[in-house]
Image (cartoon, rainbow, N blue to C red):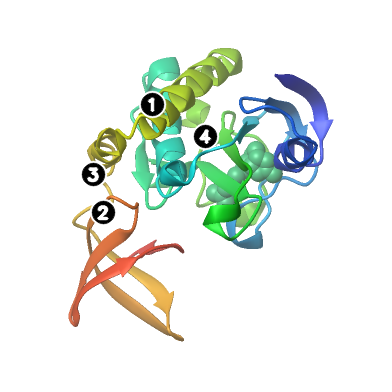
Amino acid sequence: MFWYEDVSSTNDLAVAMAERGTPEGRVVVANGQSAGRGRHGRSWASPPGAGLYVSAVLRPPSHALPLLTIAAGVAVVEAIQAATGLVADVKWPNDVYAHGRKVAGILAEASSSNAAAIQHVVVGAGINVMPAAYPPEVAGRATSLEAELGRDVDRGLLLAEYLCALAARYQDLLGRRSDAVVRAWRARAASMLGRRVEWEGGGATRDGVALDIDESGALVVRTSAGPVRLAAGEVRWV
Ligand code: BTN
């Protein structure tokens, strides 16, 4: 594990290490990030000392790929509960919410968009720990573990629990126990399943009721035109 006081993005460092051949299991952690990245090209506010910013290099076989980010989301929720007692929820595909506000997110970056050619996947997780000075555009929609709990949280313990949970869930995938990962995700998705969601698709906003995820991690939504399978992207609660 490499620990840094301040980096641009732990994902950027982990990707560079992966490209130089670093072994599976390499972990990069930072106290703060100056250019933390989120999904869909967004930035990830990463004030020093206020969050857990961690990236892991994995070299998954192709059968472990479809559920990898789902497994990482489950691991974050499990780690938060183990380290703090807070019961958080997953929002498809792998955001983590507490009381309706986002507390953690995952950015998984593969070395290739062609599944058969993937050499490595960097799984980056950001968990808001302290109610620090998040930018105003984030503050209303985000929360932190300490804000939810009203007490201090030990980031070292949270990191240890996360890496243990990530390793265990990754072992589930390697051992072809993906049903266990899907079951764990469902058990943490109470705020998601059965809820009306909307998303952008085919140039229009579409909506339906989120029913389940399938064995490849796709979200199954009931719409007025029948069931729809969302393989990637993001949905909003309506
Ligand atoms: C999201 O929900 O948009 C994903 C956020 C992922 C943030 C983490 S923090 C550690 C790692 N390094 C980054 O630059 N991003 C991820």
96 or 73, nearer to the observer: 73
Asked if the residue at tag 3 contacts the one at tag 2, i.e. Cβ–Cβ closer than 8 Å, the answer is no
Asked if the residue at tag 2 contacts the one at tag 1, i.e. Cβ–Cβ closer than 8 Å, the answer is no
Residue 213 locus on image (x, y percent): 27, 53
| SS for dot 3 | loop
List the single residue furthest toward the bottom.
203
Asked if the residue at tag 4 contacts the one at tag 2, i.e. Cβ–Cβ closer than 8 Å, the answer is no
Gap between marks 2 and 3 measured at Cα = 16 Å
Sequence-wise, the earlier of marks 1 and 2 is 1
- For disc 2, the marked residue is 214
Q: Is mark 4 within 8 Å of ligand 1?
A: no
- For disc 4, the marked residue is 144
Sequence-wise, the earlier of marks 2 and 3 is 3
- For disc 3, the marked residue is 190
Gap between marks 4 and 3 measured at Cα = 20 Å
Rendered-image quarter of ligand 1? top right
